[in-house]
Image (cartoon, rainbow, N blue to C red):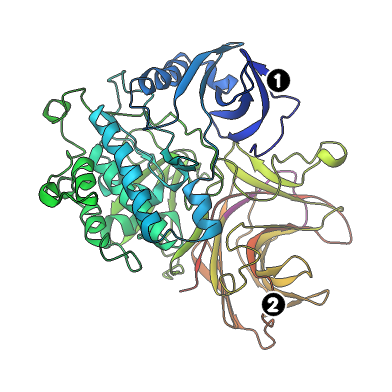
Amino acid sequence: MPRRPLDPGDPERIGDHRLVGVLGEGGQGAVYLARDASGGQVAIKLLHAREAADATSRRRFLREAETARGLALFCTARVLDAGSHHGRPYIVTEYIPGPSLATAVAEDGPRTGSGLHRLAVATLTSLAAIHRAGIVHRDFKPGNVILGPEGPVVIDFGIASAADHTVTGGGMAGTPAFIAPEQLAGQRPGPASDVFSWAVTIAYAATGRLPFAGPTVPAVLMAISAREPDLSGVPADLRPLLEACLAKDPAARPAASALLRALTGDDAATGATAPAATAPATTSPFSTAPFTSAPATTAPFTTAAADPARTVVSGGAGIPADTGNPPSRRRWLLGLAAGVTAVLVAGGVLLYASRGGEAGPRGGSLLYGDDFGDRGNWDGYTFDPDAAGDQRTTRGYEIERGVYTVRADSTDPHNVALSPVPAKTDAAAGRDVLVGVTAEPREDSGQGGLGLVCRWDEDVPSGYAFLLGLDGTARVVRRSEGASLDVVPPVKAAPPSAGRAVRLQASCRGSRLTFWIDGTRVLDAEDAHPLPPGPHSQAGVLARVPEAGGGVVTVSFDDFSVSKAG
């Protein structure tokens, strides 16, 4: 089913197809549900106009269709047609109804028994066939596995440059929680990198959590590079295979074809390893084609909703100087050094390390992360506070900027947006959590503030709010029975401003409430009158203005995470 109806700006027809709704949308383009001349349903991927203006983007987009037509039919959604709509390339594919694996696990829980084994065999069959064709997926994850009526289907193959043979080395593309260690080191991904991502995906499907967890993206990346996976909860017969696939050395991982034989009862070839990520194409054991991988500029077109992590891409290797500018989430470069975790991004260096000699918080297993690179399950579709009537939205996505924006004004002075995970119905999971986000106020912001909430019940409302005023006042507030009271006396911190993003983290653990700003603990207190357990307990972000005096505060949020409180 479409995730939303067509907007006035969406086309009504593309070629001979009538569009009926939007299945998904990202920074590079949109995926529409359409009907062909016979009334059958198809999916149409349409490149955004700004991307279509670039000749390289157009060529890579259409190469996806050319390469997909050469793959076995069971590998992915079948390509039916391709063309151009007013100068914008499009691809028509088979429509596969069904949720993504990410959505299914989030809503229905982990896969078990024979269902888990069928999932492992089906996805590995597709991956092995893709590798035989000389293709590297580069972004294998639960959001790219659709549980269709005829079985799991792997989508969004990183194949647009398969015929280019011009892949820039030293960059990184993929989804942080599923990226292989060699990619973090700047090496070119190969089939062994896909095997690693497949194992993380199956572990997540089996347990509902990531084998490499952390409260922030940098923490997850450090876990991938330095820690052993947590495979507790994975069935005993699958665990040795996944352990082999998650080896730090890509040369030590079994090949997809060998894994498939092991899963289907042929143990003789389980020792065969996948070609290393750095192996030159001339050493590939596959006769069909040398291995190539998708360009970092190729964005996913996915119908999936909220994933455990989002796809990110980067340019070439190298560490830029710290300019002091706020980080851009679109392009990540990773540098790993002993004792320090850093995510290097196109606008500067974002360090999640100690400040002023004090270490930032450490959480438990990651429950949910969102970099707002495409639309998930947060409230609001597109941020548009100036629209008329019921089209007006004071919280929503700004896909081109890769942020989720919330505006507080006289109509909604305490504007709270809640994360889809933990779910509203899962109060137990949402009680003891560590929440984090990067926040930046817009230039039009006046008096007011921004922050995080935990144990929030929007029906009352009640919960805890961790606030940073635009004047630098930091507060921890208990909201209950219509009143807001400071749990601990406020303190002064560096004020946020347009052009200066801040990292906020808040922990609710029992009656203890802790607030960090840019890695420094600014407030830490025991609530003498803690909120009693309620039917709902969610986490989220907020923008606020004084109820008396009006004004506007507009805040852009990025890199949101929720983990178990450590």
Instruction: Give the x, y percent position of residue 351.
Output: 42, 55
Q: Mark 1 = which residue?
A: 12
Can residue 299 be seen in this snapshot? yes
For badge 2, the amino acid type reads Gly
In front: 535, or 153? 153
Q: Which-is-in-front pick, marks 1 and 2?
A: 1
Q: Which residues are magenta?
A: 438-447
Q: How would you classify the magenta stretch by its main secondary structure?
A: loop
Location of residue 492 (image quadrant): bottom right
Indicate yes or no whether the magenta region holds residue 104: no
Residue 539 in the image: above or below residue 261: below
Residue that appears at 45% across and 74% down: 566
Location of residue 97 (image quadrant): top right
Residue that appears at 58% across and 63% down: 422
Q: Which mark is residue 534?
A: 2
Location of residue 548 (image quadrant): bottom right
